[in-house]
């Protein structure tokens, strides 16, 4: 089922690309977002924020230390692919392309390129990791959450349908590749120290983001959640380890 999600997203993206329907489909999906208030879309979108996704993956690694190398590789691949592809394609955001007044911007307009969606990559990567070994209904729920995050980026007005479909396929594929692959093991004694170190980095980063700028309530919330997760990573274990 997990592989089917990647294939379905990739095929839909290819269909949009070949049919030239990417921009045509954007406006109906964007305007359909009016069914929910702007706050709802911003809250959904925060599940694709890299800092919160990384915090969730580190908490998973704290419970399952054997996954730590795979999760580190997945995050590095996900972030690198987003940065490189955005720089290579430099696709302008819908708000900057379509006629004035046709797109309602519901959040801060990112300065980088639109393709692919980093939020789609991050949310699909997290969902893809959590889906491994789960029952079909659990996997279906995670896929549904990823699709809602994808729709939120269109509703907010910052991504084309092609951006989010490719991002979702890429993020889930990275999760499958990294979790199922046998990575070189590192000494188990390293993991607690590395987790605490990364937790401290996350705490400082989210604290700095909260102090420097808070454009909306969703921004505040995901940074607070990241800070709480980082504090959990910094807590000593009950056995004193």
Image (cartoon, rainbow, N blue to C red):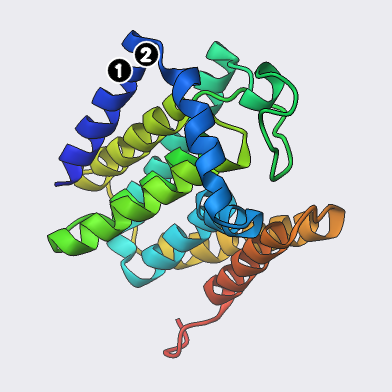
Mark number, residue 14: 1
Q: Nearer the viewer, residue 51 or 99?
A: 99
Q: Residue at x 50, y 19 (%)?
A: 23
Total number of numbered labels? 2
The x and y percentages for residue 213 are 83, 53
Is 34 situated left or right of 217 in this image? left
Q: Residue at x 32, y 34 (%)?
A: 169
The x and y percentages for residue 27 are 53, 29
Is 191 situated left or right of 66 in this image? right
Q: Residue at x 14, y 63 (%)?
A: 135
Which element is circle 1 on? Answer: helix
Q: Residues within 10 Å of mark 2 (few under 14, many from 20)?
A: few
Is 63 situated left or right of 112 in this image? left
Q: Residue at x 30, y 49 (%)?
A: 128
The image quadrant that residue 63 belongs to is: bottom left
Mark number, residue 17: 2
Is 30 situated left or right of 205 in this image? left
Callout 1 touching callout 2 (CB < 8 Å): yes
The x and y percentages for residue 82 are 51, 29
């Amino acid at each position: 089922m997990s592989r089917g999600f990647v294939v379905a997203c990739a095929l839909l993206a290819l269909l949009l690309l070949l049919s030239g329907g990417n921009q045509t489909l954007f406006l109906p999906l964007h305007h359909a977002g009016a069914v929910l208030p702007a706050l709802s879309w911003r809250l959904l979108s925060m599940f694709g924020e890299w800092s919160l996704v990384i915090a969730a993956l580190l908490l998973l690694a704290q419970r399952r230390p054997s996954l730590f190398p795979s999760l580190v590789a997945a995050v590095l691949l996900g972030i690198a692919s987003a940065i490189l592809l955005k720089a290579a394609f430099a696709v302008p955001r819908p708000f900057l392309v379509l006629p004035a007044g046709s797109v309602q911007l519901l959040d801060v307009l990112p300065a980088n390129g639109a393709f692919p969606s980093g939020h789609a990559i991050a949310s699909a990567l997290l969902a893809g990791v959590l889906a491994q070994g789960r029952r079909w209904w659990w996997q279906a729920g995670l896929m549904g959450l990823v699709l809602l995050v994808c729709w939120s980026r269109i509703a907010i007005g910052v991504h084309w349908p092609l951006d989010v479909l490719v991002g979702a396929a890429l993020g889930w594929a990275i999760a499958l590749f990294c979790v199922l692959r046998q990575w070189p093991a590192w000494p188990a004694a390293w993991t607690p120290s590395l987790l605490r170190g990364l937790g401290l980095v996350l705490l400082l980063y989210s604290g700095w983001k909260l102090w420097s700028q808070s454009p909306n309530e969703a921004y505040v919330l995901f940074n607070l959640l990241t800070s709480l997760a980082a504090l959990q990573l910094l807590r000593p274990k009950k056995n004193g380890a």
